[in-house]
Amino acid sequence: MDKFLELKELGFGSRMKRLSDTLMRDVKKVYKSLYIDFDPYLFPIYKTISDQDFISVGEISETLQITQPAVTQFINILTKKELIIVSPDENDKRKKLISLSDKGKALKDRLNPVWKIMQEELTSFIDREPTSFMNHIRLTEQEQQEKSLYERIMTRIRENVEIIEYSSEYDHIFHDLNIEWLEKYFYVEPHDKEVLENPKTYIIDNKGYIFFARFNGEIVGTVALINEKECYELSKMAVSPKYQGLKIGQKLMDKCIQFSKEQGWEKIMLYSNRKLTPAINLYRKVGFAEVELEQDVYYERADIKMVLTL
């Protein structure tokens, strides 16, 4: 049993802190999953600055109703992170004006769509019919236990990942994402270099297909279905390290399987390496089964071949 239910109003302050800490922990997990270097405790100060072209310490203190020394402490942290610029007021040299730096503006662009979803999910969490305040807290705690704020936000964010078809304007991204992945785990083989530098020639013009994952207008992942003699090969799957918490690989995989079924193909196959345990587990999860690996496979790194019967 939750002791706070027994304590009732006597435990109000501690109970509010527990709920606040739980929600703050989830927000931190969201930022970490999206590879966004931002401390949620900086949000009030950072958002207040970002809403103005220039603002002073005194104005921030008055707006947020916190002391100037506390504001100065946060300002120092943001300055060290190079997210803001502090400059003297031309009309009053004793006064410092604060604005976002270019780095701070770029971060704001990444945070805005995340904040929008957070706002909507927190509203659905908290906004309910009038009731006693303590009962309101109890219901909010119950909602958090049933499905955490982190899960709610990440589910919504993952829904914003869309899979689009090939366009030659993304050839360089197809190349860069795959090179980054190969250099991280293996090395770039001659066959890789040839295909990645000429995807239209080696894949598209050979009756193959390339798909891209797009998130907030940015291409963040890719995969190809390459026409081979035996059947189509699922290959060249790569996801930007910044967005690997969004299950983009799963979405790309699902797209390839659904597309293959729509084409009426009997099977698709892939080559991989056993050290890529998460990837192998994903392949098995969607139905790929290991088959014998031929001796003359053109990938030196390949030590496993898998086939999915459609």
Image: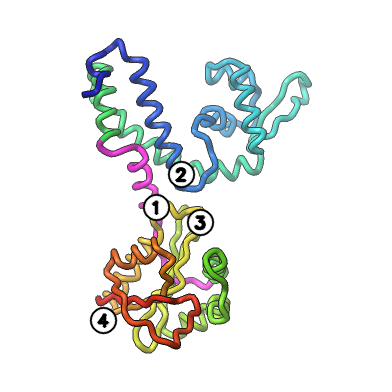
* Magenta stretch in the rendered image: 146-169
Question: Is mark 2 in CB contact (under 8 Å) with mark 3?
Answer: no
Q: Secondary structure at mark 1?
A: loop
Is any atom of residue 284 visible in this view? yes
Q: Do callouts 2 and 1 mark residues in contact (Cβ within 8 Å)?
A: yes
Residue holding disc 1: 160
| Residue labelled with disc 2 | 113
Give the image location of residue 14, x and y in percent: 36, 17
Q: Position of residue 65 (x, y in %)?
A: 53, 16
* Residue sitting nearer the eye, 195 or 308: 308
The amino acid sitting under disc 3 is: Pro
Q: Earlier in the sequence, mark 2 or mark 3?
A: 2
Task: Identify whether 101 is placed above or below 45.
Answer: below
Residue wearing tag 4 = 266
Residue under label 3: 241
Pick whichever, 300 or 168, lies toward us: 300
Q: Residue furthest top?
A: 10
Check disc 2 and give the amino acid type. Answer: Pro
Q: Is residue 307 above or below residue 250?
A: below
